[in-house]
Every structure is written in structure tokens, then in C-alpha cells.
Image (cartoon, rainbow, N blue to C red):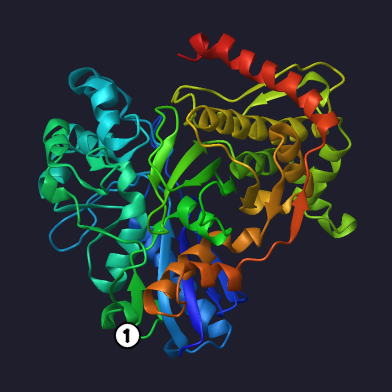
Amino acid sequence: MKPFVIGIDIGTSACKLAVFNRDGSVEALTNEAYPVYYPAEGWAEQDPEDWYAAVCRALKRMLAENHISPEDIAGVGIDGQSWSAIPVDREGKVLARTPIWMDTRATAICVRLNNKIGAENIFAIAGNALQPSYTTAKILWFRENMPDVYRKTDKILQSNSFIAFRLTGSITHDISQGYGVHCFNMRTGTWDDDMCEKLEIPREFLPDIVPSDAVIGNVTRKAAEESGLAPGTPVVAGGLDAACGTLGAGVIHPGETQEQGGQAGGMSICMDSYKADPSLILGYHVVPGQWLLQGGTTGGGGVMRWFEQEFAGEDRLLKETTGLSSLDSLNVIAGKVDPGCDGLVFLPYMAGERSPIWNPKAKGVFYGLDFSKTRGHFVRACMEGVAFALRHNLETAAKAGAEADVLRAMGGSANSLLWTQIKADVTGKPIIVPSSDTATTLGAAILAGVGTGFYNDYEEAVALTVRETRRHEPDPTKKEIYDRTYRMYRNIYESLAPLMQ
């Protein structure tokens, strides 16, 4: 048996790649950044060719620098950000940049379709409310605003399926990414022809649905030259980044829950039966036979990345003196501030907000400023605001019948002991931290492993690869403080929501 599998993660700010041994230990890892374009208010788009070029550069560098033979790779799994709409023609050429998950340009289209078809009728099939962040309205936006692109379109691809296509030549749509298109029947896991007709989305635009662990093809000779992989290497369909991260965090049984701490925030609760709520996001897990009820927020680790970029210049300059990274320095000053932040409350709606409020015009807000507030207050308020958004989603899920017990944290935010403890205290939930930085790429690699026989099944894969590194128990005393601050958080948004329109 070949000794390694590769996971590729198409994130918002960069692709991340890792080579894993069978026991889940990391043999090599790297990342490669690419831009997000913001050409107009409410727009956020990326060039899929940037993704593929970055993946190829990263693959070649990772394999060469770590002296890994491409012939030793048993399979490749790919995960990617949600709700892309990549138009390609019959030759596979990308016709336009894709609006990404935080793009809300198609708001008016959603309003029109919800009125025309009936929001409840769409939800009954798709299990998700029609919102501008999803793929559905972006396809129709192309039709109305870029007719030449729409006319030439042969297929609409997702982020992971585009990379898989470039590596293998096979065009597919994995089941975990089906939820982005509202003519996907959430109960059957198939395209619904009647809803395609009502939404006026051509059925031929939609590739065949395949399981996330299905081997869809092998690396072509052309792709091998571009990427450094060996010709013939098996590639599986892969899946949604949040779903692969959920798998990589060890969540494969009903009731187990992943807490997401990447660029975006949120959670994914594993279920073995259909439970939907219009305020949340329902999709198939990459693990067969399971659903994920998700909360997806625009404010996650990206909030701290923004704050560090804009307000931590001095910390970056002092790194050689203090020995601390700028993010570590921010954690230190935030840790000196009491829970509740002395009344400073942050709404983390930095790119509008997704679940559960679904307001593309929501704005980030600091409330409670006075002369006593320090930079540490701002940092801690950012952390607490993201935790409040997580709690809001968990409470909404509980009302829908999906109660989370222990949260399993993943993403860069989980590296902060302070932030993870704040989330435990705010939600009242214990939090387990597996290998947070590699959970998403590990999930993609596990898909490749199961699909190629590298692992017998998901039980074996998780038992071999997922390890608990630490556990955070909620502090009841602090939760009492946070309960009061959380009520303020909710009230501030409700009061300001009319102004945000």
C-alpha cells in the first residue's frame, strides 16, 4: 500500500495542503495565498484559475521540499469553500470570476424568486431558505447581468469540483455541496427537475451528484506536469470545507458537533435524520447517511485577522523583542480584560451576516465605548462577539430539535486558549480541541483514504487519525456574566437593524 494521502483545502484567503500518514500524522504541509476581489459594495469574488495555480505551486513545492515521491501518494481529496458559481464552457474554460460565499449582489433576485415561487415552497424542497449568499441566485445573476457568460456556460462548478476537474478532466458535483443550489432535493440527495424549472436554472448546468468519497478520475498527464503529482493518481470528489473539517475533527455520529474557527465561524451538528430550519443551513455530511445542520457566520477567525492587520502594527514590530507573534500579543492584552469586557459589545457582522439573521446589510458594531476602554477591550470584545454569534446559532438549532452536547473545535481560532475558553463559557458547552490547524485537510484526506481503500471505513479512519489535544470546560460563574452581555448583544442588533437597511 502506498504510504500517503493528500488533502487540499480551497479556503477564502489561501489554499492549504497536507500530506498525511495512515495514522493521521502530518508528513508535510504548506499553503499558498491568492486574492479576494471586491469590485463593488456587496461583491466578493475570486478567480478559480488563481486557486488552481496556487494549488499547483504548493503541490510542487511541498513534495520537493519534503522529498516525497509523487508515486507514494495513494489518493487526493479536495475540500472547498461553499456556494461558488463557476461558469465553464464546453472546453472547461472559466468564463468569469466566481462570486464567493460572502457575496450578496443577488439580494434582489432572491426577493423576487421568494415572492414568485413562495419561500416556503423553495424551503420544502431545498431545506434551506433562498438567500443571496447561495449559488442559486448567483447563477441567475449571470443570466441577467452577464448574458454572454450565461450563453456560453456549459456547467456550473463548485470550488472543490473545479480543482478535481482540472486534475482529472471529470465534471461532478459532490453531495455535500448540493445544498448551495435550491433545486437540490435535500431529502433525496438528487436534483429536482420541477424546482429547476421554477427557478429557471437549466438542468444541464448541473453536473451529476456523486458521493464525496467516490473516485471520480485519475490525475491526467497534463495535470501531472502542472501539479507535480504522478499521472494516474486517484482523486475523489471531495466536499464542502465545513463538512470535511467536521470529519477531520472526528464528528461522524449523530449529536456530535464541530465548532468552526476559520475565516468564517459557526458550527455543524451531525444528524441521521432530516431536520431543517429556515434560519440555519442544512446539507449532507461527507460521511454517507448523515446530514449536517449548520450555522455559518461571516465573523470568525477573519475578525481577528482584520484586527491584527489594521491595529497590531506595533506588535509585529516588537516580535523580535517580546518573542511573541502579533496574535499572541493580542491574546495577552485581551486576557487582562474581565469577561463581559466592561460593557463593550461587538457585533461581528463584517460582511453582512448569514445565519441565523440573514441580513446582507448587517454591519460590524462596537457598542459601549468610553475613555476607560483599551486596545485589550477591543480584542476581547471581538472574541466575545464571535462567541455570541456561535451561541445564537446553537440556540436556533436546539429549537429545531438538534441539540449539541460537546463541541469539537477546528480552525486557527482554536489555537487561542483564551478564545476557545470564551466560547465554552459563552455557550455553556465543553469544547474539545483536536489537531485544529489540519482538521479540514485531514477530512479531505480521509475521503481520499476511504475512497481508495487506504482506510476500511470512517470509524477506522477517525480512530487512527483524530486525537484530542485539550479540553475546555465552561465556567458557570463567567457564563452568568456572559448571559447578561449576550442579551445586550441581541438587543443591540435588534435596535440597529432598521438603521442597517
Residue at 37% x, 64% y is: 52
Q: Using residue 440 as the reference point, say whether residue 142 is left or right of it.
A: left
Res 465 visible: yes
Query: For residue 266, what is the image quadrant?
Result: top right
Query: For residue 119, what is the image quadrant?
Result: top left
Q: In what quadrant of the picture does the C terminus appear?
A: top left
Whether residue 415 is situated above or below residue 371 in the rendered picture: below
Give the image location of residue 492, x and y in percent: 63, 14
Residue at 12% x, 43% y is: 202
Residue at 39% x, 27% y is: 278
Residue at 12% x, 60% y is: 90
Whether residue 319 is situated above or below residue 121 in the rendered picture: below
Give the image location of residue 464, x and y in percent: 59, 73
Q: Using residue 197 as the reference point, say whether residue 304 is left or right of it.
A: right
Query: For residue 469, what is the image quadrant?
Result: bottom right
Which amino acid type is marked by label 1? Pro
Whether residue 237 is situated above or below residue 23 in the rendered picture: above
Query: Considering the numbered disc 1 on the image, is that residue within a helix, a strand or a loop?
Result: loop
Give the image location of residue 53, x and y in percent: 39, 66
* Residue of label 1: 231
Number of numbered discs on residues? 1
Res 47 visible: no
Structural crowding at the residue carrying mark 1, measured as other residues with C-alpha within 10 Å and reported as few (<14), some (14–19) or many (≥20): some
Give the image location of residue 364, x and y in percent: 59, 25
